């Protein structure tokens, strides 16, 4: 797990912030604390954040408002854990319906908090790693010409060169040349690796070609 990813704590209670920070730092997490939504958003970056712990009630925003704003900012959805008092349980449940991964009731059990944060940061690490793979794959496929992309789609759909040639109105030799260029430009080296790269880039072999 990449514990360099920040656990962001957003709570207006100094004592709560300090105790949560000490607990999580002691468990090996990198932590940044905020006493209000304003300072949180001034410093917030999704690519360095493992998860966000949000108190439901703060002077300048509710936890739900913070959650909604994070959702508008992030396409990749940073994990959010809601911290709530007994009177805010319904609000916390609604927050989970909007995408928060869990909520904890005050006073927070220390081991439960560490376990939830550990799960959230691992999830975030996985998502960032997969997004990195997707970005890399998209960049590699982005250098292909339109004709090479046509050949690629047929290749990942499992079609042999002769069928591709007939479908695209090319000679089998020309298809072989395009295929070699696809392999060279992407650095795939083999058809299985090319398929994995296409999947990472978001291409679906089942629907790569029009019906």
Image (spheres, rainbow, N blue to C red):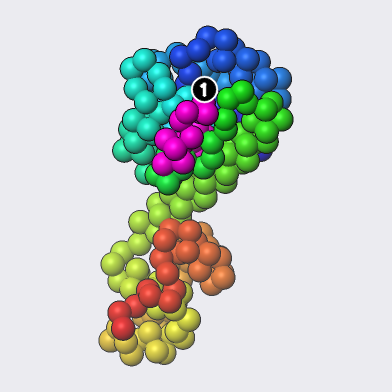
Please indicate, yes or no, whether residue 5 appears anywhere in the rendered image. no
Position of 205 relative to 62 (above/below): below
Q: Position of residue 139 (x, y in %)?
A: 40, 52
Residue beneath the point at 53% across and 64% down? 196
Residue beneath the point at 69% across and 26% down? 110
Horizontal placement of 90 versus 73: left or right?
right
Residue closest to the far top: 14
Q: Position of residue 143 (x, y in %)?
A: 36, 57
At label 1, counting other C-alpha atoms closer than 10 Å, the crowd grade (few under 14, some 14-19, many 20 or more) is: many
Position of 153 relative to 121 (above/below): below
Considering the image in quadrants, where does the C terminus appear? bottom left
Residue 173 magenta-highlighted: no
Horizontal placement of 99 versus 144: left or right?
right
Please indicate, yes or no, whether residue 145 appears anywhere in the rendered image. yes
Instruction: Examine the image and state in which quarter residue 26 appears.
Output: top right
Element assignment for label 1: strand
Report the front residue among 129 and 12: 12
Horizontal placement of 107 versus 181: left or right?
right
Q: How many marks?
A: 1
Q: Position of residue 145 (x, y in %)?
A: 31, 64
Residue beneath the point at 46% across and 14% down? 12
Residue 90 magenta-highlighted: yes
Considering the image in quadrants, where does the N terminus appear? top right
Report the front residue among 17 and 144: 17
Report the front residue among 82 and 193: 82
Residue beneath the point at 30% across and 79% down? 210
Instruction: Examine the image and state in which quarter residue 148 appears.
Output: bottom left
Residue for badge 1: 9
Q: What segment is highlighted magenta in the picture? A: 78-94
């Amino acid at each position: 797990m990449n514990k360099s990813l920040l656990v962001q704590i957003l709570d207006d209670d100094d004592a709560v912030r300090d105790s949560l920070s000490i607990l999580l730092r002691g468990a090996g997490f990198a932590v940044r604390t905020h006493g209000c939504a304003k300072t949180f958003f001034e410093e917030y970056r999704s690519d360095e954040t493992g998860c966000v712990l949000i108190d439901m009630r703060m002077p300048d925003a509710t936890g739900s408002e913070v959650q909604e704003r994070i959702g508008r900012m992030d396409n990749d959805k940073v994990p959010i854990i809601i911290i709530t008092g007994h009177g805010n349980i319904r609000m916390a449940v609604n927050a989970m319906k909007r995408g928060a991964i869990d909520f904890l009731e005050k006073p927070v059990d220390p081991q439960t908090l560490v376990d939830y944060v550990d799960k959230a940061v691992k999830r975030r690490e996985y998502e960032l790693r997969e997004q990195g793979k997707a970005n890399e794959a998209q960049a590699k496929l982005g250098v292909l010409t339109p004709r090479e992309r046509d050949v690629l789609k047929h290749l990942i759909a499992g079609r042999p060169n002769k069928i591709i040639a007939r479908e695209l109105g090319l000679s089998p030799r020309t298809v072989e040349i395009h295929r070699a260029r696809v392999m060279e430009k992407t650095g795939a080296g083999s058809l299985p690796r090319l398929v994995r790269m296409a999947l990472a880039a978001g291409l679906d072999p089942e629907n790569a070609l029009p019906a």
